[in-house]
Image (cartoon, coloured by chain):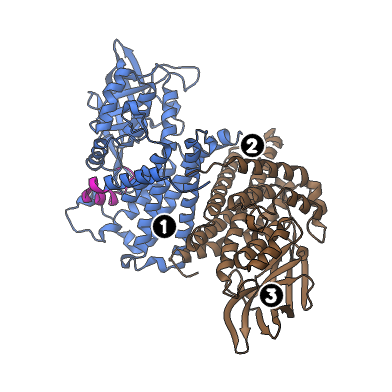
Amino acid sequence: MDLTFSAEERAFEQEVRDYIAESLTPEMKRATALTPSVFSDPDIGMAWQRALHRKGWGAPGWPVEHGGPDWTPAQRWIFEAECARAGVPNVNVMGVKMVGPVIIGFGSPEQQNFYLPRILSGEDYWCQGYSEPGSGSDLSSLKTRAVRDGDDYVINGTKIWTTHAHHANRMFALVRTSDGARQQDGISFILIDMKTPGITTRPILTIGGDHEVNQVFFDDVRVPVANRVGEEGKGWTYGKYLLEFERGSGIASAKLREALKTITDLAASDVTGRAIEDPDIAMRMSEVEVDIDALEMTELRVLSALQTGQNPGAVSSLIKLRVSEIRQAVTRLGVDVIGQDGLAVEPARPFYRLNHEPAIPEELLPVVPEYLNGRAYTIFGGSSEIQRDIIAKMVLGL
Amino acid sequence: MDLTLSDEQRLLRESADRFVAETFTSEHRKKAVNDPLGYSPAIWKQFAELGWLALPIAEAHGGLGGGAIEIGLLMEAFGRGLVSEPFLSTVVIGAALVAECGTEAQKQAILPRVAEGALTLAFAHSERAARFDLAHVDTTATKTADGWRLNGSKVAVLDGAAANQIIVSARVANANGATGKLALFLVPAGAPGLTSRDYARLGGGRGCNLDLRDVQLPADALLGDGSDALPAIETVVDRAMAALGAEAVGIMQTLLDTTLEYTKIRKQFGRPLSANQVIRHRLADVAMQVDEARSMALRAALMANAEPAARSRAASGAKAKIGKCARFVAEQAVQLHGAMGVTEELDIGAYFKRLLAFDTLFGGSAHHYRRHAALSGRAHA
């Protein structure tokens, strides 16, 4: 056993570092640091997507025949770690990490040829139509209906918590095409052009002051049947496959470590009156850092199992739960570190393009919004309660 | 980067698991609790025959040259069986102190005998006023015409009664007072001036408090050449904490397995306890903490030979985190067993107490989070 990477892997690490250094602009870096959300605004995120695509790194997890870089698990780890360290923008994960793998796994050759290159190049921006007002954790109770009419489906209903629906030109959605014996039956997975007549989007402001999520309404929206992925009525299977990617695609420890470092640096600076000298803060930082160490080690155990062709087994399902809790712990620490500067609310967005001088030092602006937005970490992608249900059933066999 | 076990390591784990499951039964443990020696010399001999006592000792000194990963595999198995043999005291700490500090002659005299099971060791270092500060030693060693004279008191000496030789830490003093240097001395069991108050240790095994009053030792009782022993003590204690962490993981895994089984069998209100969401979620949390503890113990073992600051941060981080997880897992195991959990009729209590002992040994979670923060340059310890 050892924790060190091979000479080739270290050379790859250097290649990633060099490429990031030459393509990550100071504007992108500053914008990312001042974005109090896991989602970068599209102008920033897609600029980075294009930079990655130029290098052939647009979709690290995809197979090589669809434009993936054919990396080993260790290379993916190194890439994610270097990206986190450098503070690169987040790309459109709904495209690269969510709908992409589903189209690769279950889409027709025509769908693959049309959509995948547009995800890689950053031409398309995707949003996810899963949750509905009456269907959150109980997702498969969803009611948005697609009724077959000739070569089209006619869609009526509504989706909610749709991140960046106001930016996206495409949505992948779970819709009900029939009523089966179980509520999971009769759901289909469909790709929708957001410019189709009958689609309206209502913004929902969240407590951090950000406009990230929306409610989307469908009134007699006609979508070609050819836009259905896989078989009619089998959408739940594809949707679950995607959720596993959403939960398990995480190499999250590197990002968490950087987030903690940002807070630690603030705590060590005069801007916060050297909050780090408070022994309680210092000790809690160690607590969070050690939690990140444990998470990183768990991720490396999964990686090592994948690397040697073993099934990492149940351990990966524990990761989503811990990642969300640790993220929240980091943001909570941030609020305590900045103290009374947390009282100042800056309503304008984005923070990196304000046309006035903020009331508090710029680097403190995202701290409270990050904490507030961060309450959603234990809710989206299957709430922590749902995760515990899954662990009890799948890991513990209860 | 490879965290999978080698074939040899897999064999070691399998043989340790098998031996522990067959030997350290519930009945065995109930007998061992009342044994004043705290362990079985017959089993110790088997440990030697299996090569376990030679495992981390260098090949040049009659050992097998294993490392922290192998120690961890053994310790995890020992945790599953609540083994009370003085493996940590003799092999993980005692032999390691000799290997770190001893002269070549001392290594040749001691280490092969440890490997073959002919010599047991204990480490007398902690003092009441020190709490968990490894650098705080008030016991003195004064140079005499033909050797050394030791005075002081030690607490929490693990397996002291079972040891043939006790390694005692003391601050070197001359006619003008303390020199400040820490030194280690080999004190034979029963040396004149050495008195011991022996006790049954919480969670199994034995411990003792020692008084040293004008204990006279020959010149060669000094371990090594007289250079400051603190760095070696820190190295060995860091590695001991990694080993203890692996043992704690074995204990926690057993508590999880046992509790899972119990909640499936025990019925109330006409259904198994495990049908209740509140129980299922609690067990999910227990499983998660066992897994985090496993990651931390592995991490501490992998960092056992890192440079001192990184090694100590990993060891303290592991001790703190595993201690926190251990208390949660232990308390939930008792809670979910209901009233039966607080009786001596089940093994749960014994495992619970061993985890409580784990959290205390070498300092609890709060101490090690503080040490971690200090080592990270964040605050004073």
- How busy is the neighbourhood of tag 3: few (under 14 within 10 Å), some, or many (20 plus)? some
| Residue A38 painted magenta | yes
* Tags 2 and 3 both on a single chain: yes
Query: Which image quadrant is residue A104 in?
Result: top left
| Amino acid carrying mark 2 in the image | Ser
Give the chain letter at badge 2: B
| Residue A65 painted magenta | no
| Mark 2 vs mark 3, CA separation in Å | 62 Å
For disc 1, the marked residue is A333
Query: Which image quadrant is residue B37 in?
Result: bottom right
| Amino acid carrying mark 1 in the image | Leu
For disc 2, the marked residue is B274
Near-viewer residue (B62 or B148): B62
Which residue does the image show at 40% across and 42% down from the upper left? Answer: A77
* Tags 2 and 1 both on a single chain: no
Q: What secondary structure is marked by label 3? A: helix
Image spot of residue B316 (x, y percent): 54, 60
